[in-house]
């Protein structure tokens, strides 16, 4: 069945196109006039992305690479803070916190910081309090995010100590990572280990 054709004439110009195509053009034109302009957000172009491990101007730290979309979290770059924020207990020893993720440190932060016993989670609190370049959305990375940092930018971390993740193993232990060799295991939440905040930059 041949599509219905429409002929448009304007002066000496004649345009002949399928009716369905003309309808799409008309709808697009209406939306372009009715909808407000897009928010003034600068898009990220490949040429504007710093190399792995390089400082990302205005983003509060260093580029730790692209993290693929997972579940309901869109693809994003992981930004590592420029410095550690000390040694802290994971906290909450004896408490098995519900809703803790192996991959989503941001969600972990919401659970730990929003907990009524929030003062019992010093490592997560230290990251939440960190600010840089006007950004106040840093958090303690989950176990998978910490491993992502070891794969991409191990040179940004000290090699003679262990770093806490925000992923617990049980009521009494949580996961940590040693950046000297990528060894990842769990230890008691009452130990004071090194802490490094991260944040997300969505593309």
Image (cartoon, rainbow, N blue to C red):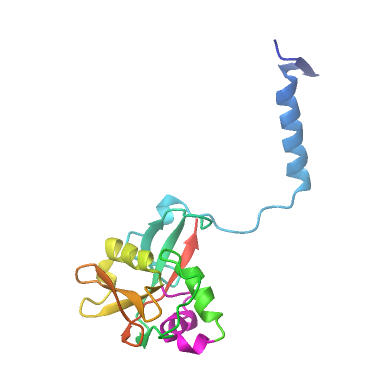
Q: Which residues are magenta?
A: 117-140
Q: Nearer the viewer, residue 9 or 115?
A: 115
Residue 184 visible (yes or no):
yes
Q: Nearer the viewer, residue 140 or 10?
A: 140
Q: Nearer the viewer, residue 98 or 66?
A: 98
Question: Residue at 78% across / 39% down in the picture?
Answer: 30
> In the picture shown, does residue 88 fall above or below 3?
below
Q: Position of residue 147 (x, y in %)?
A: 31, 65
Left or right of 121, for residue 154? left
Left or right of 129, for residue 5? right
* Location of the N terminus (image quadrant): top right
Q: Position of residue 93 (x, y in %)?
A: 40, 86
Residue 58 visible (yes or no):
no
- Quarter-of-image position of residue 87: bottom left
Question: Residue at 46% across / 51% down in the picture?
Answer: 45
> In the picture shown, does residue 28 fall above or below 20?
below
Question: Residue at 37% across / 59% down in the picture?
Answer: 65
> In the picture shown, does residue 70 fall above or below 154?
above
- Quarter-of-image position of residue 54: bottom left
């Amino acid at each position: 069945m041949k599509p219905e054709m429409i002929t448009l004439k304007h002066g000496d110009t004649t345009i002949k196109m399928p009716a369905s195509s003309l309808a799409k053009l008309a709808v697009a034109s209406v939306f372009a006039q009715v909808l407000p302009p897009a928010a003034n957000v600068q898009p990220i172009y490949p040429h504007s992305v710093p190399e792995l491990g390089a400082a990302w101007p205005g983003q509060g730290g260093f580029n730790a690479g692209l993290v693929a979309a997972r579940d309901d979290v869109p693809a994003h770059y992981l930004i590592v803070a420029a410095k550690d924020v000390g040694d802290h207990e994971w906290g909450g020893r004896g408490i098995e916190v519900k809703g803790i993720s192996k991959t989503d440190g941001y969600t972990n932060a919401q659970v730990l910081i929003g907990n009524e016993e929030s003062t019992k989670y010093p490592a997560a609190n230290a990251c939440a309090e960190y600010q840089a370049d006007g950004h106040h959305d840093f958090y303690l990375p989950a176990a998978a995010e910490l491993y992502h940092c070891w794969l991409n930018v191990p040179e940004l971390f000290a090699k003679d100590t262990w770093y806490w993740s925000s992923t617990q193993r049980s009521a009494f232990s949580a996961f940590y990572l040693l950046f000297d060799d990528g060894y990842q295991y769990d230890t008691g939440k009452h130990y004071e280990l090194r802490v490094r905040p991260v944040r997300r930059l969505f593309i």
